[in-house]
Amino acid sequence: MRYVALACFIFALPASADLVDRIAVAVGNRAIKESQIISDIRVAAFLNGGTLDLSGAAKRKAADQLVDQALIRTEMARGSYPPPSDADVNDLLKRVKDAEFHGDSAAYQKALSKYGLTEAELKAHLAWQLQVLRFVSGRFEPAVRLRAAKNTNAAVIGERVNVEFFAWLDQARARAHIQFHDEVFQ
C-alpha cells in the first residue's frame, strides 16, 4: 500500500509542475533557453548600471547575442582555447567591483540582489568574456599581423581584428540553421 501511495505522489508531480523553462532559439544542435536570455539581460544591466528590461524586444536582442555566442562556442570547440584561470576571473571581478562600487561590499551585494544575480553567475559571465577575447585574439590577430605593415600600430591592428571577427561571425550566421521560437519574445 505504501508503494501505491508513493507512486500516486510521484505521478501527480508533473501534473502540478509549473513551466520552468523553454527553448527560445535553436542554433544547429544547440538550444538557447529563455532562462539563459534572462540571465544575460540581468548581467548586462548589472555591468552597464542600466535598468532591467525584460521586454520581448530586449529578450530578442539578448537572444541574438547568445546566437553569436553559440557560434563562437562551436568554433572554439574545434580549436584549443582554454578557459581563463580563476585568478584571471577574480582579477576582472575585482576591477569591476573597484570601478563600479569603489570597494563598497554592501553596495555590490545590493546591486547583485537588485538584478537578481549571484556572484557565481557574474563570474561565469566574466570568465566567458575573457575566453571570447582570447578566442578573437588567438583566432584572428595572427593573420591580421601577418598581413599588416611592420609599423602598423595596435589600434589599427585591433580594428582589423574586429572587422575580420565580425565578418567571420556574419558568415557563420549565414551557414547556421537558426530557429527562433517567437512565443518567447512576445
Image (cartoon, rainbow, N blue to C red):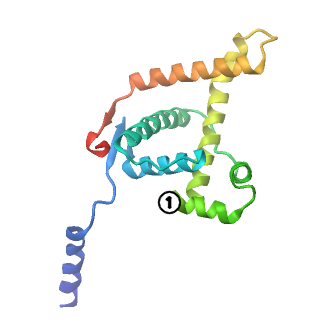
Residue at 23% across / 83% down in the picture? 6
Residue 22's place in the image compared with 151, above or below, is below
Which residue type does callout 1 highlight? Gly
Residue furthest bottom as drawn:
1
Position of the C terminus by quadrant: top left
- Judge from the rendering whether residue 126 lies leftward or rightward of residue 66; answer left or right: right
Residue at 58% across / 52% down in the picture? 124
Q: Residue 151 is drawn in which quadrant?
A: top right
In the image, residue 92 lies at what x, y percent? 71, 48
Secondary structure type for disc 1: loop
Residue 184's place in the image compared with 159, above or below, is below
Q: Is residue 87 visible?
A: no
In the image, residue 154 lies at what x, y percent? 76, 21
Position of the N terminus by quadrant: bottom left
Residue at 78% across / 17% down in the picture? 153
| Total residue callouts | 1
Disc 1 packing (10 Å; few <14; some 14–19; many ≥20): some
Residue under pointer 1? 116
In the image, residue 68 lies at what x, y percent? 47, 33
- Judge from the rendering whether residue 16 lies leftward or rightward of residue 126; answer left or right: left
- Judge from the rendering whether residue 17 lies leftward or rightward of residue 130; answer left or right: left
In the image, residue 14 lies at what x, y percent? 23, 68
Residue furthest front as drawn:
51
Residue 43's place in the image compared with 142, above or below, is below
- Judge from the rendering whether residue 59 lies leftward or rightward of residue 150; answer left or right: left
Q: Is residue 116 visible?
A: yes
Q: Residue 179 is drawn in which quadrant?
A: top left
